[in-house]
Image: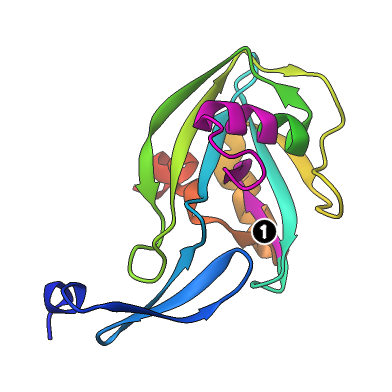
Amino acid sequence: MTAEDNARLPAETTWEGRFIKAIQQGTWEYVARRGGIEAAVIVALDAQDRVVLVEQYRVPLGRRCLELPAGLVGDDHAGEPVTDAAARELEEETGYRAGRMEELGFFHASPGMVTEGFTLVRAHDIVKVGAGGGAGDEDITVHLVPRAEVAAFVAGKRAAGVAMDVKLLLLLADALI
């Protein structure tokens, strides 16, 4: 049975939690966010061409993970524009406020397993206005890394056992290809 054949079959929710649900459709099993919640991922560079990265513990991985700042859109603020959510998350996670936010496109990180996608947003004219670190128990560490040194920084973090989010490939493309 092809993927298109499976897509024509009814989808059945096999489990549902507060934020996600597991779905079976033909022979396919995948996960979706509930309630139309999306994500925004932020690329932020300061005036010295340093990229803002965050590191936080991720329960599914069982370790800390290096990532671009990101957050949910529509989880607590229904109807919130993506750029507003991205600006809010950037400041909450990193302590940086953007002068302007620019949507760069919508992407899927793992389309064979998850329906979730994210809007990539570029933060322009960032200014440090707070400590960052996230909300509640997020325990986010903020890193400012010169763009020319990202590959070496990632390699050092990887050697230390830190997981890498796939979206870091945006910053590593030149070093990898």
Residue 66: image location, x then y, percent: 65, 52
> Front-most of 90 and 19?
19
In this picture, which residue range is highlighted in magenta? 64-89
Q: From this view, report whether residue 119 is shown above or below residue 81.
A: below
Residue 74: image location, x then y, percent: 57, 43
| Picture residue at 68% right of the left edge, 30% below the top | 88
Q: Secondary structure at mark 1?
A: strand
| Picture residue at 12% right of the left edge, 80% below the top | 2
Is 75 magenta? The answer is yes
Q: From this view, report whether residue 31 is shown above or below residue 44.
A: below
> Front-most of 111 and 54?
111
| Picture residue at 80% right of the left edge, 43% below the top | 134
User: Residue under circle 1?
Assistant: 65
Specify whether 111 is left or right of 10: right
Specify whether 143 is left or right of 18: right
Specify whether 72 is left or right of 176: right
Is 171 magenta? The answer is no
Residue 51: image location, x then y, percent: 62, 31
